[in-house]
Image (cartoon, rainbow, N blue to C red):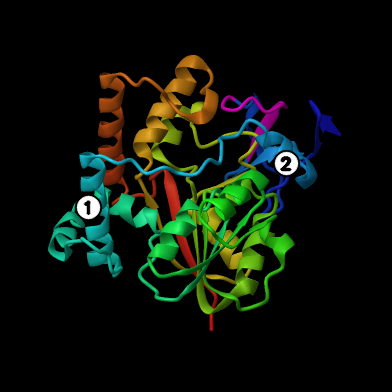
Amino acid sequence: MTNEGITVSIVENCPLCKNKGKILYQNLRDRLFGAPGIWNLMYCANCEIAWLNPMPVPEDIPKLYKEYFTHEAYNPEESAIAGLKKLIKYSILKSTYGYHMDGANFLLGKLLSLIGPLEDIVGGSVMYLKSFPKGRLLDVGCGNGFFLYQMKKLGWEVVGVEPDGDAVKVAHEKYGLEVFQGTLEDINFPENSFDVITMNHVIEHVPDPFSTLKECKRVLKPGGKVVVITPNIKSLANNIFGKDWRGWEPPRHLFLFSSKSLKACAEHVGLTVDKLWTVSKSARYVWWASREIKREGKLPGGQPKNLSFGLKLEGFVFWALEYLLCKIKDVGEEIVMIAKKED
């Protein structure tokens, strides 16, 4: 069957327990990039997982990304403020994550790392990976390759996979990276190829999370780790905004997880979850974006613009509140999972 030109299948049962899910929200449209279709979100309360229904078939998923954000090369800001930000970031990376950074101050980094929200942001920029000279890193859904470019400068040997041809072109031409076009399953890397695999806001986009995680396990070296960051359906902002929460993003987000369901998916394919927590580093953005969606019914381009001082202040207050609540409950906007392939 088709949904406004998108070939779809009906998926009513939970991918984990196989029981029939319940409709969480229905008759949703893309409020960010104008992709076609009318969509429902299903939910399994027992497993704490949500999924899109109807589900686009893999061959038609690219149609949902025609107006998606551009994959232009990242151009770093050059200013005194940018220089200060770089000093802060490099100092924390040196003191907390063990990277050798020119111009970084170890003592300053130690002190700044005590500011939890700041450490979250800097740690997220390296997917919470400590220094591993010559470690082999694969980034799945690497976009334009900027993350890989940064990690290469930090001493990693890097490889990327990205389905978007324009993004792959930027990664090749701008950053000189080894990036393959396609899905992880398409590329068929040899077994035991990588020390670490990263997926930053990727697993919610793939049509079969189990297949992707299983392939991660196959191509990891024994003892290797996969690091996943994904929206958290138990987040504080979701509890506040409901169907207007930025994290839903139908129809591109096919599956969404809680900490419980993401852990269950990893264990289902034989990975051992080493660490699992939620972070608030994107809380300001999610607050601003969700407020705009609730107020205007849409957020063209996915980015809030012309924020008032009051709204900026709201975002900072919400960020602080969520950061504190994360200490006692998994209510951060993003889940971070580090899972290991046993030796």
**What's the residue at 28%, 51% (across, down)?**
327
**Of residues 32 and 142, which is closer to you in this image?**
142
Q: Which of the two labelled residues, at mark 2 and mark 1, occupies the earlier sequence position?
A: 2
Segment colored magenta = 31-42
Magenta span dominant secondary structure? loop
Residue 32, magenta (yes or no): yes
Rendering quarter of residue 40? top right
How many residues crowd around disc 1 within 10 Å: few (fewer than 14), some, or many (20 or more)?
many
Q: Mark 1 points at which residue?
A: 88
What amino acid type is highlighted by mark number 1? Ile
**Of residues 151 and 172, which is closer to you in this image?**
172
Q: What element carries label 1?
A: helix
CB atoms at circles 2 and 1 under 8 Å apart? Answer: no
Quadrant, the N terminus = top right
Residue 242, magenta (yes or no): no
Residue 236 % position (x, y): 39, 38
**Of residues 274 and 59, which is closer to you in this image?**
59
What amino acid type is highlighted by mark number 2? Ile
Residue 240 % position (x, y): 41, 30
**What's the residue at 50%, 26% (across, down)?**
244
In the rendered image, the residue lying farthest to the front is 173
* Residue 123 numbered tag: none
How many residues crowd around disc 2 within 10 Å: few (fewer than 14), some, or many (20 or more)?
some
Residue 305 % position (x, y): 41, 23
* Residue 61 numbered tag: 2
